[in-house]
Image (cartoon, rainbow, N blue to C red):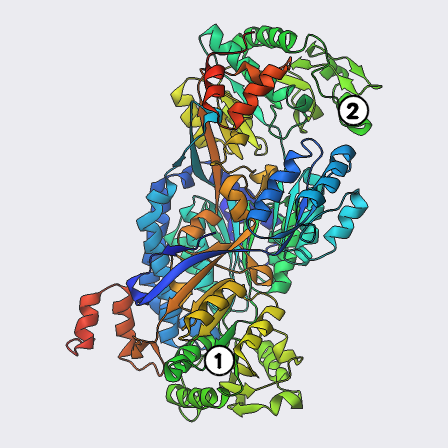
Amino acid sequence: MTPCRVPIPLLAFPSRGELVPEPLGVVLIFASWNFPIGVSLEPLIGAIAAGNAIVLKPSELAPASSNFLANSVSKYLDSMLVKVVPGGPDVGQMLLDQKWDKIFFTGSSRVARTVMAAAAKHLTPVAVELGGKSPAIFDSLGSPRDRKVAVERIVGAKWVSCAGQACIGVDYVLVEEQFAPVLIDQLKATLEKFYPGLDCLSRIINEQHFQRLTNLIKDPSVAATIIHGGSLDSETLFIEPTILLDPPLDADIMNEEIFGPLLPIITLKKIEDSIEFIRARPKPLVIYAFTKDEKLKSRITAETSSGSLTFNDTMVQFACDELPFGGVGGSGFGQYHGKFSFDLFSHTKPVLRRSFLLDFTFRYPPWDAWKLPFMRSVYHFDYLALLLRVLGLKRR
Amino acid sequence: MENGAEMEAVGGGCDGARAAVLVAGLRRGFASGRTRSYEWRAAQLKGIARMIDDKEAEIMAALHDDLAKPHMESYLHEISLAKAACTFALKEMKRWMKPKKVPTSITTFPSSAEIVSEPLGVVLVISAWNYPFLLSIDPVIGAIAAGNAVALKPSEVAPATSSLFATILPNYTDNSCVKVVEGSTPETTALLEQKWDKIFYTGSGKVGRIVMTAAAKHLTPVALELGGKCPVLVDSNVNVIVATKRIAVGKWGCNNGQACIAPDYILTTKSFAPTLVDAMKRTLEKFYGKDPLESSDLSRIVNANHFRRLTSLLDDEKVSGTIVYGGQQDEKRLKIAPTLLLDVPHDSLIMKEEIFGPLLPIITFNEVEDCMDFINSKAKPLAAYLFTKDKKLEELFVKTVSAGGMLINDTALHLANPHLPFGGVGESGIGAYHGKFSFDSFSHKKAVLSRGFSGEAPARYPPYTPQKQKILRGLINGSIIALLLAILGWPRD
């Protein structure tokens, strides 16, 4: 919150400049259903730290969490300035009709477009945290132990994360043809270890999403590529961890964000082809790459674009408060976590202070012919010329 | 032929199809990777700097054509600031482009992290008519420094400058990645229908809304540099001559009031108002003589539309009756003299809309605090100014008034400081630029985390047990013991 001083060019001497953060005012936060408590509280914390008043609208698809927040926030926080408004799309629309000083939205691109269009009416700045198809590039790692750790981390980012219903989860894996069998074996072994029964696995949030996921593997040309799992229980809304090997690239499962426990593996001739593969598609929220090849790492960093890029692990970048978290292109805009949250919900106001002491006449009209050369000297930082002019020793 | 199609897109009549061809060309240019290198960016910026040097006379002539802008203003506010932006970017760019290492915590130990700046891709810059040279080239400089391909749409309301850009910019920059598109509403609409990676708009709130609505269809981030009513609060405890000079040069010395950061209206106490008005009259006479319409140091009003808009602000008798100085107009030459009004009704149009012209209302209150309440009752302006020697008043002003930027004891200068972010808040805009802020505005800050395969915590994975939860809690809370246990791989598989 402390204002920070900035250097002042000699031209504006004497003066003092600083940047003063101030709250934007009254902000609206829309939370998603998959990490309903976390994704509600994280931006809330940032907005409070920056000094704003807040309305939080949790997702109606997670009603128990929504009610918990509605009841608890009023107990632990100043309910005059931090309010929770539960409800569905109609409540969301009603809130969007109001004028806010900032809107922070986590969710799908489809709804984000509605939010931004509504915000445009009031010139309200927005931050939209969306998703995308976050790939994991799986290079050959040499040691079996490293492979085991790597695959556990991939499984951790797929099924362990809310059964794949996570924006930073692994959507699909890219691997060289020759290493695909090793990868698949390790995936199966890890799944067996982690999930002897299905009781540690989240279910699908609701019937609509269950149906959406079912449809992704309904197509016979897609279903034919299932090499593990594939069973669905519409009663309990559980889908078994499912692996597909090279489904058709034009199928929905390879064009929409999966957001579920289905993992396509796409094989390539060379692992370097993964760069071109990713670049041909919308920018994802995160790219994961498992490799020890420093050259490949540099190439991935320089030649792909994503919200974040994590080497040799998954998910943990979310916990690094020194790193900004957010998307780019199709995966959104606006970043938060740590100080980035504070900045996101602040206006950084520049304040320049001058005194009445020194006042240069050549700054003012009437702009006689002699004044323009003066200003040129000043702007070129040509202080010698300026001095000579002041002393009357230089006219042109 | 590709060149032909692109050349057509540059001239007038850029419709949807041509806009699509233009964007596709820029995407190809960006995809080639040429804009990523420091060498390419530096070459473009050096080209622009050379262009400003070579074509200074032509630029001044175009500005004079469009606005009757005095040469001094053209130099001070457009040419020198544009050149300074190039020079500053060339000096600092290598540093800006360098990834920034950030610390990591025990939670991800061992790991290294950095923030890498990368270009957003293909960006659109829509410029305004009042500083048609600077407000076009300044954002373009930022976009190029950040490694983007860029399309510039200069304002058609300043046609001489627009056409100058279309003619000279291609000769100094790489045409595969830097394009100028001329045109008016239909052409701008066609451009806005395309998908861009960022849109940077300078202009009015009304069009800002249209731009953001169009951007929403593609979820394109926007920066909007708008305006507002920039207030000047004048305390009685000031050097009144210097204060009026600085207010006058920020108002009439900036395109005759047609500037987003020009003082829009003055607030002062009833007791001080006579002194202030008196000093202001003396300053104005010193600056512009007894017949300001004949002074060559004043820009004209940009066109007949705006002339009518301004003169109609004075139509209301309750408003024109408060004129205490000036008021002269010449419709043929589109000139309006500096005009002071004392205590116009608060609900008059002149106090509701951004004036953007040479009319300066002075509103008085009994106490200085009432003046601040008045400012806060209106939309947040692009800039707020205070003249005072009272430190306590200064602190109160900084703390309670929100504005894009703030200047104490001067006006407009903060625009020229590349270390200060320039932009609005609330109705006065979204985003900021100048200096490194331009670079950041057109960049994506990619978070890159690098780990190895040691330091694995099986506690992360199912089947979940209470012991695992304990370790994870410890790890996340930064406990060394939890870290040690995790390194030792406890609990065992």
Q: Position of residue B333 (x, y in %)?
A: 51, 85
The label number, if any, that marks residue B399 in the structure image: none
Taking B212 as reference, is A320 left or right? left
Q: Point out the frontmost of discs 1 and 2.
A: 2
Q: Are marks 1 and 2 on the same chain?
A: no
Question: What chain does badge 1 belong to?
Answer: B
Type of residue at label 2?
Phe
Q: Nearer the viewer, residue B465 or B156?
A: B465
Mark 2: secondary structure = helix
Of the numbered discs in the image, which one, if any, rests on residue A210? 2
* Residue B158 visible, this angle: yes
Separation (CA) of disc 1 from disc 2: 66 Å
**Rendered position, B374 above or below B99:** below
Tell me where residue A285 sits by quadrant: top right
Residue B218 shown left or right of residue B173 in the figure: right
Up-down: is A177 above or below B336?
A: above
Q: Which mark is residue B300?
A: 1
Q: Residue furthest left?
A: A393
Q: Residues within 10 Å of mark 1 (few under 14, many from 20)?
A: many
Residue displayed at 55% across by 19% down: B471
Label 2 environment density (alpha carbons within 10 Å; few <14, some 14–19, many ≥20): some
Q: Position of residue A268 (x, y in %)?
A: 54, 16
Q: Residue at x 56, y 38 (%)?
A: A326
Horizontal and vertical percent for residue B382? 52, 65
Residue B359 position (above or below residue B120): below
Mark 1 touches mark 2? (CB < 8 Å): no
